[in-house]
Amino acid sequence: MSIPIFVVDAFTDTAFKGNPAGVCLLPEAKDAAWMQNVAAEMKHAETAFLVRSAEGFDLRWFSPAVEINLCGHATLASAHTLYREQQARPDEEIRFFTRSGELRARKDGDMIVLDFPARPAKEAVPPPYLLDALNVKAQFVGRSADDYLVAVASASEVRNLDPDLEKLRTLSVRGVIVTAPADKVGVDFVSRFFAPGAGIDEDPVTGSAHCCLAVYWSGKLHKTEFIAHQLSPRGGVLHVTLAGERVLLGGHAVTVLKGSLLA
């Protein structure tokens, strides 16, 4: 039996920008080892696997190396694919059941908006090698449920980061978010995300990191709605809203490949 699989560039309206994700529409649940093998074969930061359930879709995400607890761009790619392939109505809010609880997606004009849990970072002592690996002077170091958050003074520091990935690989977290105030009119903050321990040296655009960033920048900028740029080489744009204990992540997506898995 062939299984539909897609490659979707998320948090961009231009093909070959943003963050590519695999999206696999399964007729029934598959075992974790098979999904991990597919994700390793796809080699994207994450591949999403969806199975229709009574009230929505069961959703799991795998990097090339491990299963992931929460992924924004592959969820955006999943919602985009379900709408595009007419697996969900244009006016329908899609419910996803995941390791991080229930997530939702809806269309808002030409954007898709995700409803995710906030993941605040508590101030933390930086672990050995973290700041050395980044070669930055931190204004704040915190730890969320998944990642370390490092705030620096300027967007140019974020833009010019060249971290020691081998040192970052030793950390006992999913990844490291580095952020600063934006230096461009109309943008509130910038970031980059590194997760070599999860098989992702640098993630092009990381929706789930903004569940942490929204809380941090709300405290700094005293607002709840933001335009965020992730400054990876591919780049991406996120419309971010902090809504109590939830974070709304808005973005565009473009399908670049549609095919079939035969194994």
Image (cartoon, grey):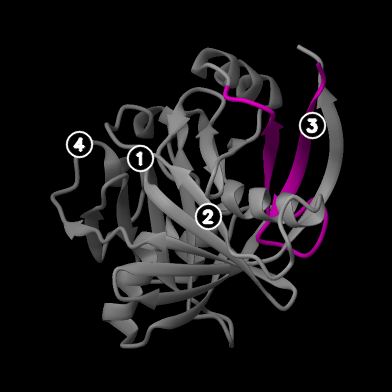
Q: Position of residue 200 (x, y in %)?
A: 53, 34
Query: How far is disc 2 from disc 4 in space, using C-alphas?
Result: 40 Å
Q: Nearer the viewer, mark 3 or mark 4?
A: 3
Q: Quadrant of the C terminus?
A: top right
Secondary element type, mark 1: helix
Above or below for 250 versus 65: below
Q: Is residue 249 left or right of residue 90?
A: left
State which tag comes first along the sequence, 2 or 1: 2
Secondary element type, mark 3: strand
Residue hosting label 4: 128
**Does the magenta portion include 237?**
no
Amino acid type at mark 1: Ala
Q: Residue at x 15, y 53 (%)?
A: 124
Secondary element type, mark 2: strand
The magenta segment: 1-29
Q: Residues within 10 Å of mark 4 (few under 14, many from 20)?
A: few
Amino acid type at mark 4: Pro
Q: Position of residue 11 (x, y in %)?
A: 65, 61
Q: Is residue 189 left or right of residue 80?
A: left
Secondary element type, mark 4: loop
Q: Residues within 10 Å of mark 3 (few under 14, many from 20)?
A: some
State which tag comes first along the sequence, 2 or 3: 3
Q: Residue at x 38, y 29 (%)?
A: 169
Residue hosting label 3: 4
Query: How far is disc 2 from disc 3 in space, using C-alphas?
Result: 20 Å
